[in-house]
Image (tube, rainbow, N blue to C red):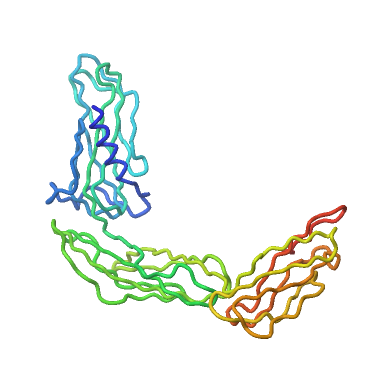
Amino acid sequence: MNASRSLLLATVLSASGCLPADRPEGVAATNVVNPPPYPLSPQINAPVLFDFGVILANGQTFSHTFPLRNTGTTPLRIVGSNAETPCCSSIESLPDAVPPGSTASFSIQYRPGFQSGRKAAAFTIRTDAKDAPERRFVVLASLVAEVEVGTLEPSDRSLRIGQPGRQRARIVSRRIGGVGRPAPDSIVAPAPLAARFEGPATESTWPGGVNESVRVATIDLPGTATPGPRRESALIRWDGDRTWTLPLSWQVAPTLRASPATLILDPARGPSEFSVIVRSEDRPFRILSVVGPSVVANDPLPTKPDRTWSVRFKLDAARLTPGTSADVVLATDSSDQPTLDLKVVILPTGGETRHEKAP
């Protein structure tokens, strides 16, 4: 194969992608329109080429049998093979040798998943032939995904503590003739989440007889009292017990943030003074108290609400007993975040050990 042909093949294959075959598999290419009713991308000039045409991709497996000819006068031994996209293709039933003047065959399997677009999968057969030891075989397909689900904007990916939010999704269902899926019937999410469709499906028809239904879903996210990542899922349902899982993820950020949030306490220095800046993301607040087993004293606390406060206090590691937490808790009048924890790390000195929070 010359350099330009190899580059073209590599370019198409690099865009092909593979999906794991984790959906129910079909068998033969029953939903193939051949040849494609309209061009989707340039063809690949390979020694042996087969085009499946337009395929409604729904996780099924397609197969094709290629001929392997020996035009020489001695047996052609097969010494190796390679499926260049092993994630979504494989070689089956490869013979050990082809007699002189004969034609053998081998089959390939192609698992495109739920992809869309013009895709290719290449296979290499290595032989003991001196003139052309490698033979390249390529299958092509114009894939139309039966289902595509994507996020729509605006969608909340970061919420403050206690703040509810919303995410939106676009669900596309496609059919060719009588094969495929209509618009989904329902969408559900576990409480306290709530999911619903925003309106009826929008219907359209592509060239080549592809019918497309689009629905937009909204998922309401509850306010959460604990900061950190959140992961849930919604279930999209079609008739005939067909489903699709829609993953949901968002981050819950604290309303109040402290800087620094971790304090280093050295017992060898005795009581140590710390200053912490606390800021609110949305509204004024007050700090009501500074509490912790190592707290010795603190400066007078603010009496008027503000969005930023500087808190000064002293900590003494000598006040701690083994196994107790050294952390400091700031109590606030914020309804979203009534407490703010400051991590305290005790440096070991002499025979002492670090006091850490009990599990």
Where residue 196 sits in the image (x, y, percent)?
35, 76
The N terminus is located in which quarter? top left
Q: Nearer the viewer, residue 289 or 56?
A: 289
Furthest residue to the right? Answer: 351
Q: Image height check: is 273 above or below 96?
A: below
Where residue 148 sits in the image (x, y, percent)?
30, 60
Furthest residue to the top? Answer: 73
Horizontally, is 75 left or right of 33 in the view? right
Where residue 135 sits in the image (x, y, percent)?
26, 27
Residue 153 quadrant: bottom left
Residue 176 quadrant: bottom left
Q: Image height check: is 127 above or below 21?
A: above
Q: Nearer the viewer, residue 132 or 287?
A: 287
Identify the residue shown where x is 83% and y is 60%.
267
Q: Nearer the viewer, residue 285 or 54?
A: 285
Identify the residue shown where x is 28% and y is 55%.
58
Residue 292 quadrant: bottom right
Horizontally, is 307 left or right of 11 in the view? right
Horizontally, is 280 left or right of 216 in the view? right
The C terminus is located in which quarter? bottom right
Horizontally, is 334 left or right of 325 in the view? left
Identify the residue shown where x is 30% and y is 45%.
15
Furthest residue to the bottom? Answer: 304
Q: Image height check: is 244 above or below 97?
A: below
